Image (cartoon, rainbow, N blue to C red):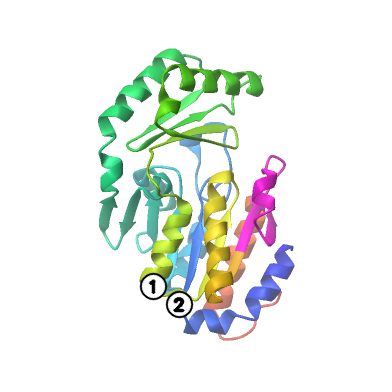
Amino acid sequence: MSLNELKQSIDKLADHMKQNHWGLFCDIDGTISDIYRTPDVAKIRPSIRKALAAIRPHLAVTAIVTGRQISEAMEMVELEDVTYFGTYGLEKWDKGLLTVSEEASQYTERLRMTSSAIATNLSTPEVIIQEKPLGLSLHYRQAKKPIHIRNQILTVIESTGASDWMKISEGRMVVELSLPVEIDKGTCINWLVDEQNLTGLIVIGDDLSDISMFEAAHHFQTTLGTHAFNIGVIEEETPNEVIDKVNYKLDGVDEVEAFLTWLSEKLDSNCDINL
């Protein structure tokens, strides 16, 4: 379903949102930030930041759920009164308190050694190695022959033994290495639904790592009757697996911007907003 259909569905529940416990869960890259050739230059559009700030007082939870480390996420979004989950849920920042998965912390030294081995064996400017305290991302969007570079990355991951103990996943021109801990983005939704007794969920994402969020929202919809809006940000390289998990589709970050701006105005207003 399209942006207009999403607005129509949300419009019917605007009063319910104000009077009950709803949560908004957003990915960053490819969702509220455009995809850039190098991840370090990515930024949040000011209008999206403004919309999130306006939405926050009306919902029980406004959460940023990202694969980036939490310090990067907070620096990009620049909002203090939202909940942040970094490194796919291994880090959480809420109300001024940072918590880190104890299980994940046990792998710090082993991760450092693995990251060093991969960097030594993958010395090409076409791969950007993004080291995180609790994970590793290998970006190859700059590659002239992306399939070749992807295969090279996977070969190095195997030859260094990283694949023997880390979780390997892929996204849009990126290979992710995660710690062997049973926490993902969907876990973040599970935690906050239980903690805040959420009765409605708006989930926005664009890549394979967001599927666990969509699945969690769908689970609560089918088992508890929770209102759930799974919204995919669709572009040319969006994986089919993502498209299959969403019931609303937005055309890139432009339509995310339009939707969040509309939602902020809708929640701020006591009268109907033109669809």
| Quadrant of the frame with the N terminus | bottom right
The front one of 49 and 14 is: 14
Q: Left of 148 or right of it: where is 169?
A: left
Q: What span is in magenta?
A: 230-252
Across and down, in percent, residue 136 comes to 41, 32
Which amino acid type is shown beneath numbered disc 1? Gln
Q: Secondary structure at mark 2?
A: loop
Viewer-closest of 78 and 191: 191
Which of the pair 265/177 is nearer the observer? 177
Disc number placed over residue 21 in the picture, else none: 2
Residue 221 place in picture, x, y as percent: 57, 71
Horizontal relation, residue 199 to residue 206: left or right: left
Q: Position of residue 11 (x, y in %)?
A: 64, 78
Please state which amino acid type lies under the numbered disc 2. His
Let me know if residue 249 is in the magenta part. Answer: yes
For residue 196, the mark is 1
Check disc 1: other Cα within 10 Å, few if <14, some if 14-19, many if 20+.
few
Q: Is residue 264 visible?
A: no
* Circles 2, 1 touching at the beta carbon (< 8 Å): yes
Q: Which of pointers 2 and 1 lies earlier in the amino acid sequence?
A: 2
Residue that appears at 74% across and 62% down: 2
